[in-house]
Image (cartoon, rainbow, N blue to C red):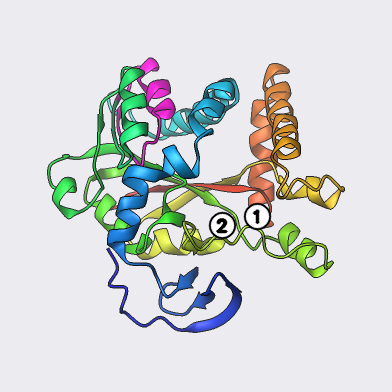
């Protein structure tokens, strides 16, 4: 974990709930300051995230499983296109309720998750996948061995030191193995347009549990700086486009869910029509423009 007494400097770009968000010159990406104490974060993610903060998350992932499996299939397809047939081991950091692991196991992969949430770990095991209920840190990493793929989805925004975590993850990655990272694409042009219009404040800034804010470029630089070589960068459907078109879903869960169902239908209909590769090409193009709701980036461990 990052020493929270460490001083980070950079231009302040936002302030919310007593926290500044800075364009950090040391880290190369935006993050909150001061950083919360690691002990408070550990309690939150072990005991409260799925039970208190996100009580509908697991239920909704069940409802969305067909769409999620389309995303997961894209990722496993990418891994398999880059790796030899016998290289099929994967470690999922912050594996959540286990749906990504379940998809991989059904494809014949040897999968393992590590997840701090008690509730999410229990759910993952109910799906028949192996999950360690703990935090990924030097002590746990030393017991895990090495893998062909390390996957971390929607994890880096939550932790005090993404640089340290990725460097540690690389020690568990085989030579020429793949690291796949997803993170929210925040401060993107569509979000900025909505703020500049005066209709919205930066709703995506949530200092309580989103400590770090990435773009495709900053996440690429972060991976390159720890010795990884990025070979593919995609985003996902730009949810902020609904706001630009007048669907004011911020703070309206029912409308937000309806917009989410539309983006799921967009992806699933293209896949149903045999145009999944066209969909992926669109999202690669959007990534080059820093547009899309989430970033999905792939890098190879070139030793």
- The disc, 1 or 2, on the residue closer to the chain's N-terminal end is 2
Residue carrying label 1: 288
Residue carrying label 2: 216
Whether 104 is among the magenta residues is: yes
> Which of label 1 and label 2 is nearer to you?
2
Q: For the point 72% across and 65% down, which residue is it?
A: 201
In the image, residue 172 sits, relative to residue 187, either above or below, namely above
Answer left or right for 120 relative to 236.
left
What x and y, as percent, mark residue 63?
Answer: 58, 22
Is residue 227 visible to the viewer in this orientation of the structure?
no
Secondary structure under badge 1? helix
Q: For the point 28% across and 50% down, which residue is it?
A: 169
Q: Which residue in the rendered view is the most extreme toward the front? A: 52
Q: Residues within 10 Å of mark 2 (few under 14, many from 20)?
A: many
Q: Residues within 10 Å of mark 1 (few under 14, many from 20)?
A: some
Do the numbered discs 1 and 2 sit on residues whose CB atoms are within 8 Å?
A: yes
Secondary structure under badge 2? helix
Residue 105 quadrant: top left
Q: For the point 30% across and 53% down, which residue is it?
A: 42
Is residue 41 visible to the viewer in this orientation of the structure?
yes
What x and y, as percent, mark residue 198?
Answer: 83, 68
Q: For the point 32% across and 31% down, which residue is it?
A: 121
Q: CA distance from mark 1 to mark 2?
A: 8 Å
User: Which contiguous range is marked in magenta?
Assistant: 88-110
- The foreground one among 83 and 211 is 211
Answer left or right for 208 relative to 189.
left
């Amino acid at each position: 974990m990052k020493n929270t007494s460490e001083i980070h400097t950079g231009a302040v770009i936002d302030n919310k709930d007593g926290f500044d968000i800075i364009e950090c010159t040391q880290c190369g990406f935006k993050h909150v300051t001061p950083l919360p104490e690691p002990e408070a974060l550990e309690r939150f993610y072990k005991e409260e995230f799925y039970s208190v903060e996100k009580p509908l998350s697991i239920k909704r992932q069940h409802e969305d499983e067909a769409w999620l499996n389309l995303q997961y299939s894209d990722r496993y397809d990418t891994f398999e296109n880059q790796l030899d047939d016998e290289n099929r081991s994967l470690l999922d950091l912050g594996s959540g309720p286990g749906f990504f692991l379940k998809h991989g196991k059904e494809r014949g992969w040897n999968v393992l998750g590590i997840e701090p949430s008690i509730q999410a770990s229990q759910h993952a095991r109910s799906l028949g996948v192996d999950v360690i209920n703990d935090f990924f840190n030097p002590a746990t990493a030393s017991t895990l061995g090495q893998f062909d793929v390390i996957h971390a989805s929607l994890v880096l925004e939550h932790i005090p030191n993404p640089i340290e975590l990725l460097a540690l993850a690389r020690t568990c990655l085989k030579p020429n193995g793949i690291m796949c990272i997803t993170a929210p694409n925040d401060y993107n042009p569509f979000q900025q347009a909505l703020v500049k219009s005066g209709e919205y404040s930066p709703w995506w800034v949530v200092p309580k549990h989103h400590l770090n804010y990435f773009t495709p470029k900053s996440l690429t630089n972060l991976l390159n700086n720890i010795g990884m070589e990025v070979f593919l960068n995609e985003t996902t459907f730009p949810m902020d486009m609904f706001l630009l078109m007048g669907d004011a879903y911020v703070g309206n869960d029912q409308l937000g869910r309806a917009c989410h169902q539309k983006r799921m239908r967009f992806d699933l209909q293209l896949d149903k029509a045999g145009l999944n590769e066209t969909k992926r090409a669109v999202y690669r193009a959007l990534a080059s423009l820093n547009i899309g709701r989430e970033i999905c980036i792939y890098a190879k461990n070139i030793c």
